[in-house]
Image (cartoon, grey):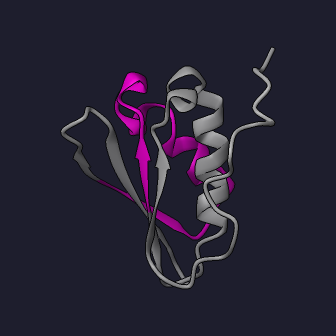
């Protein structure tokens, strides 16, 4: 059963016509991998074609390629994923390029 996340603030409230970063490494994200995936999809969807969103994911879930990339590639035909780096805090950065 999924945890109630109705009180979790969305990572985006508007479409982004520029490159930007989505913070998916809050304590609630550490406790709920499904929330990370859901909000990562929301972030990609809110990113206009020709730009990218940096998805900063919590380190507790490990490398995002193992749980996030397949989900994003299945949801979007126009996204290219690139691993950027591991943050000093242990989180990971995936750059999702939204193609035209």
- Classify residue 92 by image quadrant: top left
Residue at the left extreme, as displayed: 88
Q: Give coordinates of residue 18: x percent, y percent.
A: 48, 82
Left or right: 20 with respect to 83? Answer: right
Q: Assign the N terminus to one quadrant of the image.
A: top right
- Classify residue 3 by image quadrant: top right
Q: Give coordinates of residue 46: x percent, y percent.
A: 65, 69
Q: Closest to the observer: 62 or 17?
A: 17
**20 within the magenta span:** no
For residue 41, above or below residue 33: below
**63 within the magenta span:** yes
Kindly identify the residue that appears in the image at 53 percent across and 66 percent down. Answer: 79
Q: How many marks?
A: 0
Start and end of the magenta stretch?
A: 54-83
Kindly identify the residue that appears in the image at 63 percent across and 47 percent down. Answer: 39
For residue 87, above or below residue 76: above
Q: Assign the C terminus to one quadrant of the image.
A: bottom right
């Amino acid at each position: 059963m999924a945890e109630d996340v109705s009180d979790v603030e969305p990572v985006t409230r508007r479409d982004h016509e520029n490159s930007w970063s989505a913070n998916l490494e809050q304590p609630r994200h550490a406790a709920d991998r499904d929330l990370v995936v859901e909000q990562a999809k929301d972030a990609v969807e809110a990113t206009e074609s020709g730009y990218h969103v940096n998805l900063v994911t919590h380190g507790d879930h490990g490398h995002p390629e193992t749980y996030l990339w397949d989900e994003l590639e299945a949801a979007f035909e126009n996204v290219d994923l690139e691993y950027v780096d591991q943050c000093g805090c242990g989180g990971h950065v995936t750059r999702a390029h939204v193609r035209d």
